Amino acid sequence: MKKKAVLNNNALCQTRISAIKDTMEILSGKWKFHILGTLLMGDKLRFMDLLREVEGIGTKMLSKELQDLEMNHLVKRTVLNTKPVTVEYEITEFGQTLGAIIDEIAKWGIAYKHALYQKSE
Amino acid sequence: MKKKAVLNNNALCQTRISAIKDTMEILSGKWKFHILGTLLMGDKLRFMDLLREVEGIGTKMLSKELQDLEMNHLVKRTVLNTKPVTVEYEITEFGQTLGAIIDEIAKWGIAYKHALYQKSE
DNA sequence: GAAACTACTTTCCTCCAGGGAAGTGACTTT
DNA sequence: AAAGTCACTTCCCTGGAGGAAAGTAGTTTC
């Protein structure tokens, strides 16, 4: 008989694993963290603002990623009827809760660099 | 004169952004979170154990991802001189610190699902 | 001596994320 | 009427992530 997984085989683990998968799917791609991080700081930003703030992104990627985020209710899009149409993007209330993850990731990245530095001494 | 980024243009932001980039680079790919999550639970696991625990992964990916993680000092590899050679993988002390990120991500994933459920009512 | 188990590596192939560049359309300024 | 701004979309193309399968190599069991 073939051996089976033991550790990851109970309901609690499965919930956890699928929760991680879900989160990472929603935040997939090269730009989501960057966009969300920016949006978490300046609360209302227009398309062109984001294009400037998120260094390196192009229009195609930005609009696609924003659509993804909007679909998942993390970002709210508002069209203003100004002279040339402007569109405002802001983080939703629920999107705000991602702050904890992003903080944790940033914190770890900094700790990692420090740890490397100490090792190389 | 061309407009410039304002929000993300100070030293603090830049450190934060590059810290996030670093972390995500280290944890890039389809399997790293899954492998690390498993390794965080059962502290010493052999190659074949991981192959069984991490559902869906193949030998090539597993060995490549483990090499990546080892290179970044998150996982320790130990070869035992047993009958057929066995290799043990375990999370390093520093790798343990990733637990906080993984927990936060899992927590968020679960909260996200709950939020979706409430909206659809 | 054949098969099976350990831990991989290598080769080959496919798919798609993501980049560049150009186009659209509505309005404004010069 | 030409050029510019804002917010996109569309098209084309390429690199590389990742999967399947077979190969390597040492040892041990049948």
Image (cartoon, coloured by chain):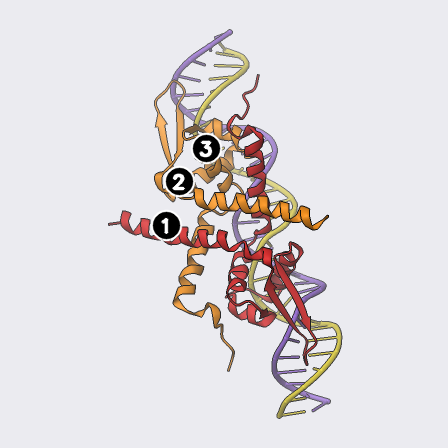
Chain colours: A orange, B red, C purple, D yellow
Where does label 3 land, which residue? A41
Tell me the CA gap for discs 2 and 3.
Answer: 10 Å
Chain identity of mark 3: A
Image side of residue B39 versus residue B70, left or right: left
Where does label 2 land, which residue? A96
Image side of residue A31 versus residue A67, left or right: right
User: In the displayed structure, would residue B45 be above or below residue A27?
Assistant: below
Chain identity of mark 2: A
Tell me the CA gap for discs 1 and 3.
Answer: 22 Å
Tell me the CA gap for discs 1 and 2.
Answer: 12 Å
Where does label 1 land, which residue? B112
Please state the horizontal and vertical placement of residue B111, each as a whole percent of the image. 36, 51
Which of the 4 quarters of the picture holds residue C9? Answer: bottom right
Question: Is disc 3 surrounded by few (<14), some (14 to 19) or many (20+) residues within 10 Å?
Answer: few
User: In the displayed structure, would residue B7 be above or below residue A116?
Assistant: above
Residues beneath discs 2 and 3 located on the same chain: yes
Instruction: Residue type at mark 2: give it.
Output: Gln
Q: Between residues B77 and D30, which one lies in front from this camera angle?
A: B77
User: In the displayed structure, would residue B7 be above or below residue B100?
Assistant: above
